[in-house]
Image: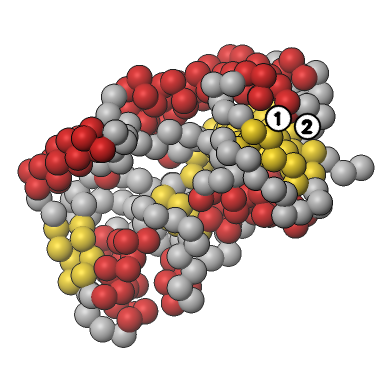
Amino acid sequence: MTKTVAITGVTGFIGKHIADNLLARGFRVRALTRTSRKSAADNLIWVRGSLEDRDSLTELVSGADCVVHCAGQVRGHAQAIFTDCNVNGSLHLMQAAIESGRCERFLFMSSLAARHPDLSWYAKSKSTAEQELTAMASGMTLGIFRPTAVYGPGDKEMKPLFDWMLRGILPRLGDASAKLSFLHVTDLAEAVGQWLVAERPPSGPRELCDGDPAGYNWQRVQHIGEKVRNGKVRLVGIPLPVLKLLADISVLACRLAGKEPMLTRSKINELTHQNWSASNNGLSEEINWSPRISLEHALRERQF
């Protein structure tokens, strides 16, 4: 029997790749969108609405066996902006799933940042959402994915960093010895698909990364860049005062433009954090999943 999955965030970077994976697996997909769209596939239905519109969420989960919640706020100038979407919006969706009486599984796309809720507004909102969804979930399996830095086709955050590196300059944020981790979006989408088809999908938080046994720091990323471009890569540290100045300028410019900023002093705390190492231990066996795309391979094949 073909399962139906309701997905939020399909118009975004990660959500699009997840939807494509599920459609290729034969799932029926119901996708939330703020603007009217025409379905490009027979098993894809667009539902117009938002996380604030509870009626649209009821329509979204109608007939759905599972929910994959990818929509989230990543830009903002204050805690309330992140809380409204990442916490309240998530709870609205969970309530709709519960009230549908049919939903068996709910997968929340959180972030590795949720490990450190005091680090930033974003981190706190993801951590709070995890806790409140866990308290609210009833009669269904609640999965929580905490991916590390996700990159791949359609990404706008990591791509500039990689583009600069392959030109010979790698901007370094934070300490040179900071531990880093990465995950290609194709591998993340595959993990979501595997979680949905697993006989007994794991509940609770699970970290996801590319599983590189050596892990990463800035020097290793620099070395990978040099191998790929067959030339030197200069590692350039950006001083914290400069980052803070750039953040203040970004906030002011976005305020004048009526937009929410990506770079804020709160975000800098994330970017310069000392330890973003992660592990797939447990999850790989639980859902029969192993990441296949290494950072070096993705850079060589320009899969970003």
User: Can residue 131 be spotted in the picture?
Assistant: no
- Three-letter amino acid code at the position of disc 1: Leu
Residue drawn at x 72%, y 49% is: 39
Element under label 2? loop
* On-image quarter of the N terminus: top right
Q: How is the image coloured?
A: secondary structure
Determine contact: label 2, label 1, CB under 8 Å: yes
Marks 2, 1: nearer the viewer: 1
Where does residue 64 sit, x and y in percent of width and height? 78, 32
| Image position of 142 with respect to 22: above or below | above
Near-viewer residue (215 or 18): 18
Which percent across, then down, holds residue 172?
20, 57
Q: Where 293 falls versus 143 (above or below)?
A: below
Q: Which mark is residue 38?
A: none
**109 horizontally vs 21: left or right:** left
For disc 1, the marked residue is 60
Q: In the image, what residue occupies the spot 44% across and 47% down?
A: 148
x%, y% of residue 139?
A: 75, 18
Q: Which residue is mark 2?
A: 64
Look at label 2 and name its amino acid: Ala
| Residue at the far bottom in the pictured view | 230
Along the viewing direction, whichever of 153 and 145 lies nearer the viewer: 153
Spatial CA distance of label 2 from label 1 is 8 Å
- Label 2 Cα neighbours within 10 Å, binned few <14 / some 14-19 / many ≥20: many
